[in-house]
Image (cartoon, grey):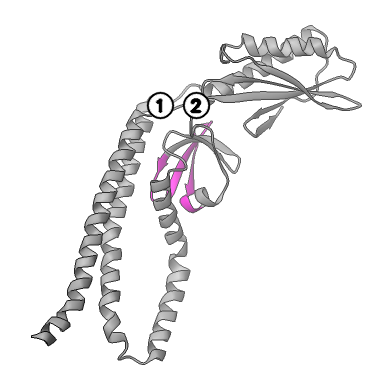
Amino acid sequence: MNDLISTYAYPASVTVVILALYSAGNLSLLNKKRRMLKRVKKREVFDPIQGDTPDEIDDNKILQLGVDSIQSRFVFIQRLLPIFLALAWVVFMSVPYLSALPAIYISVVLTIVSVVAGISLRPFLENIIAGIIVSFFQPFRVGDTVRIEGQYGVIERIDLTQCVLRVWDWERFVVPNSKMLTKEIQNLTMHDSLIRAHIEFWVEPHTDLDQVEKISLDAAKDSHFSLKNEEPVFWVTKLDKDAVQCWVAAWAENPSDAWELRCDMRKRIHSSLREANIRSHSIQANLQGITIKN
């Protein structure tokens, strides 16, 4: 009787632990999915740029894509969970029998399996692991406006292996999740949608800077894309023998308005400087580190 108990005690214990982990993992995934779906359905989506858009692409569709991507990610994770646990069960059940095999055989088999798996599955596994990390820690979410490697747009979809970024000209960029974790990402809407847009421009050294300041601040204030409860600011950021660099900034309600505000200020300042016979050099526009030259 004791031999029978000792024979089945280890496999029974391993099986119970694996089943408990499966139940706990499933419950945790379901709770996490409910919380994420609840947050996504309450979110507002801001396009990085306002403009004519296809009729079939709207905020509701973007939010629905977010819901679908969450559903697909968690379905995939739920399918992977029993596979990983089954592999773990096989490994633990094999432990008592490994001592009967020569150590050299075990070493050779493990080395071959490790090398083959490392070479063939590394990119896929990196993206899978990155997708799981993104799902749980959420450094960005569907509907966020982000900038990565010079591309600036809205996160339209997050899958387990990749993210889809919709940029200003409505093109889609598919970015592997591993790159989304290893590259520096600027999330413009992580905590709120407010954003400060600023432009830089140059004027001649003999120019009346008080007049330039008034022109710049008026351009920012008169734009209907700027927040009226936040005063714009004007700075002289560089003095050069050939030109003076000026900097003006104003707050916008969201990234879409920030883009429009930046363009509107450039147009107004350029027009006002010409009317005042003030020569300006190449104008640079900057939005949270994104520089565009005319």
Could you tell me if residue 161 is visible in this image?
no
- Where residue 95 sits in the image (x, y, percent)? 30, 81
Q: Quadrant of residue 242?
A: top right
Residue with the mark numbered 2: 193
Residue with the mark numbered 1: 44
- SS for tag 1? loop
Image quarter hosting the C terminus: top right
What amino acid is found at the position of numbered circle 1 in the picture? Glu
Instruction: State the separation of the CA atoms marked 1 and 2.
Output: 9 Å
Q: How many marks?
A: 2
Given contact means CB atoms under 8 Å apart, are the residues at marks 1 and 2 in contact?
yes
Of all residues, the one furthest to the left in this rendering is 1
- Is residue 109 toward the left or the right of residue 25 in the image? right
Could you tell me if residue 31 is visible in this image?
yes
What amino acid is found at the position of numbered circle 2 in the picture? Ser
- Where residue 115 sits in the image (x, y, percent)? 46, 75
- SS for tag 2? loop
What residue sits 73% from the left and 25% below the top?
200
- Where residue 271 sits in the image (x, y, percent)? 72, 11
- Is residue 63 toward the left or the right of residue 277 in the image? left
Q: Which segment is the magenta one? A: 157-178
